[in-house]
Amino acid sequence: MFYDVIVIGGGPSGLMAAAAASEKGATVLLVDKGNKLGRKLAISGGGRCNVTNRLPVEEIIKHIPGNGRFLYSAFSIFSNEDIIRFFEKLGIKLKEEDNGRMFPTTDKAQSVVDALLNQLKKFNVTIKTNTPVKEVLYENDKTCGITLTSGETINSNAVIVAVGGKSVPHTGSTGDGYAWAEKAGHTITELFPTEVPITSNERFIREKQLQGLALRDIDLKVVNPKGKDVIVHKGDMLFTHFGISGPMALRCSQFVIKTMKKFSLKEVEMQIDSMPDDSIESVFQKLNKLGKEEPKKAIKNLYKGLVPERYLLFLLEKADLDLQQTYANTSNEQLRTFAALLKGFSFKVNGTLSIEKAFVTGGGVSVKEVNPKTMQSKIMDRLFFCGEILDIHGYTGGYNITSALVTGRLAGINAAEK
């Protein structure tokens, strides 16, 4: 058995790589250990598939804090706008939603998967599912094929490794590719979970005081031991029975891990600014103004609507204010304490859920050892990497799929030219 190109892994980057290589006229074999291709694509974006993001390239790279700059060359060859054109050519109309996120107008991820599979069929890609790969074969500093766990060897001119990272393992991403990369001489940078809920051992979390409460349009910060903001994200978050979750918690998660590691900490401080558009002084003035209008009103009713009620009662308690107390009986000092909590409620977190529970894997094949224009290994000829096995990770919102599709496209085109 001989193929020009073998692609291992049927996720977004593998499907795109197989499509690109076959369009260039290469004979392509796509192998996947699962029974179904495109499983990660099918569940992405809540089952609607956030195909890409329409923000300018500069902005997209900012949203890929894990080595996003490595993608500059790739974007100059095949960009997010090219992804949109590619899918529209396949009959998948896309629509733009908040923050540039692009979804199929069908709102069904499966239609995106089917379009890619039809493309593979059209260009006669051989597909083998339920086919685990044991190893990638190297000879004389060249990649020459693969061995399956069944013992069968399949030879090729080039191999593209597109098996994903270690997150969302039920879709088949169980970290198989790292050993094959190391055997070729590659460095695997330390793996860690990103885009993952954050854990805390604070008493209010253990006692589930705020469990299930969502806060909207807040600033969520990770603060280092020197009191400096490591990162600030504005948006929504959710309190859980183990810590915090929701979009902004996920975005902060990698910075929690990095700060704990950098400063050798068991816990790191986070802060919630529930009124990010106001200064602490203007919050204080607002509290006074409301109080002067109705001085005999209990403060828990007076300040209703500033923040969700459960959070309001929680912060009033933290400020040692009696809920039935009226504004007339409240000192300026007490109000300043309350204003400070609205602007910066601090709590400690102690890590995140495991990598298996993460949406994205941080770490992977070092991008220093991969050609950014072709996705070919700089160490082993005819070996290509694409998608999440690379040490590239972005926020959720179409950035990781964009990275997977762009690197997959380049790997496919260049492997075919081999």
Image (spheres, helix red, strand yellow):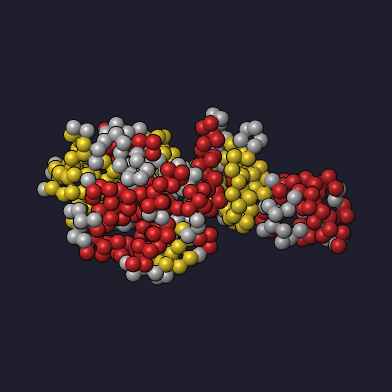
Q: In this view, does 104 lie to the left or right of 293?
A: left
Residue 285 location, quadrant:
bottom right
Residue 181 location, quadrant:
top left
Question: Is residue 260 placed above or below 280 in the rendered structure?
Answer: above
Along the line of sight, the residue nearer the viewer: 138 or 190: 138
Q: How many labels does the image show?
A: 0
Which residue of the protein is positioned furthest toward the top in this rendering? 264
User: Which residue appears at 33% of the width and 67% of the height?
Assistant: 89
User: Which residue appears at 45% of the width and 62% of the height?
Assistant: 102
User: Which residue appears at 37% of the width and 52% of the height?
Assistant: 77
Along the line of sight, the residue nearer the viewer: 41 or 403: 403
Check the picture and name the quadrant holding the C terminus: top left
Residue 379's x, y, as percent?
29, 34
Q: In this view, does 105 lie to the left or right of 343?
A: left
Mark yes or no: residue 164 visible: no
Residue 156's x, y, as percent?
17, 45
Residue 239's x, y, as percent?
58, 51
Question: Is residue 192 placed above or below 295 in the rendered structure?
Answer: above
Residue 327's x, y, as percent?
85, 55
Question: Is residue 223 placed above or below 63 in the rendered structure?
Answer: above
Q: In this view, does 61 lie to the left or right of 2?
A: right
User: Which residue appears at 71% of the width and 61% of the height?
Assistant: 305
Mark yes or no: residue 138 visible: yes
